[in-house]
Amino acid sequence: MKSPKAVATPSIEEVVAMAPELNAWTEMAARAFGSYSGINEAIKKLRPIGGPVCDHASEIRQQMIMIALIRSFAVMDRASNVSFQAVYRFLKLPDALHLIARCYADSEPKNTFENSLPECKEAMSKFIDAYMSVDFTGLGRLQSFRNSAIAHITMPDIEKAKVTYSDVEKLIRATCEMAGRLTLMLSGGNDWPMEHLEDAHSAVYTFWTKAIKAQ
């Protein structure tokens, strides 16, 4: 029996390099899930109205939840060099806080290392809290999607894996928090994917409510 392959812990330079990509992928997942939840709310509130527009909205809703799943799983892939698991491994290093604080202090606008420490400590703590909130049992049910055909999963695949709305929502909210905290602790920047989720939900809900009523 083969022993599990060791997963490397990234350097601070690698964490800095992966942060924008993690934020971008998380934002895509957030937008997709916001679109899904917006359509979902519109359809539920307008029941028993049906019709072709409602059917089309339901099809798009399924596509959005699949996109959200694919993007979320990508940033939570333990074997990937670019993932929140990799960041978590780095943050567990004894000198992680000092390395992070140095990046924060050196970013624009410049700050002192001493003033950067408490900001980074809080951001790190909240990142770790979000990471620990992930239901890894639920995440494990997504393992069947981790293959070369990941872009071609279907709703029956999701249903067979017993992935629930709650599983996906909790995962996406956790990754949104981690992405925002990672950006904050490295640069002091405010780039929160959760805001994109909320914006997408509102815009999509408004659009499909009007479209379904107008059919």
Image (cartoon, grey):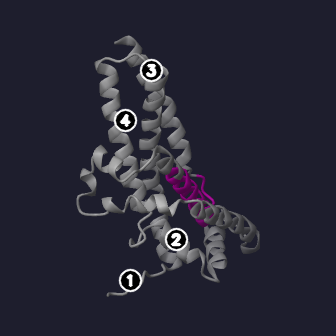
Q: Is residue 111 left or right of residue 149?
A: right
Query: With 214 as the anchor, is 171 left or right in this view?
Result: right
* C-alpha gap between disc 4 and disc 3: 13 Å
Residue 124 at least partly seen: yes
Quickly name the residue at label 3.
209
- Which amino acid lies under the numbered mark 3 shown in the image of this protein? Thr
The quadrant the C terminus occupies is: top left
* Pointer 2 local density, CA inside 10 Å: few below 14, some 14–19, many at least 20: many
Residue highlighted by disc 2: 87
Identify the element where label 1 is drawn.
loop
Q: CA distance from mark 4 to mark 1?
A: 38 Å
Task: Tell me, yes or no, whether the two marked residues, 2 and 4, touch with CB atoms within 8 Å.
Answer: no
**Residue 4, disc:** 1
Q: Amino acid at mark 1?
A: Pro
Q: Amino acid at mark 4?
A: Arg
User: Quick one: SS at disc 4?
Assistant: helix
Looking at the image, which residue is at 66% across and 72% down? Answer: 101
Q: Which residues are magenta?
A: 171-190
Q: Tell me the mark number nearer the camera, choosing from 1 and 3.
A: 1
* Among the two numbered marks 2 and 1 on one chain, the one whose residue lies closer to the N terminus: 1
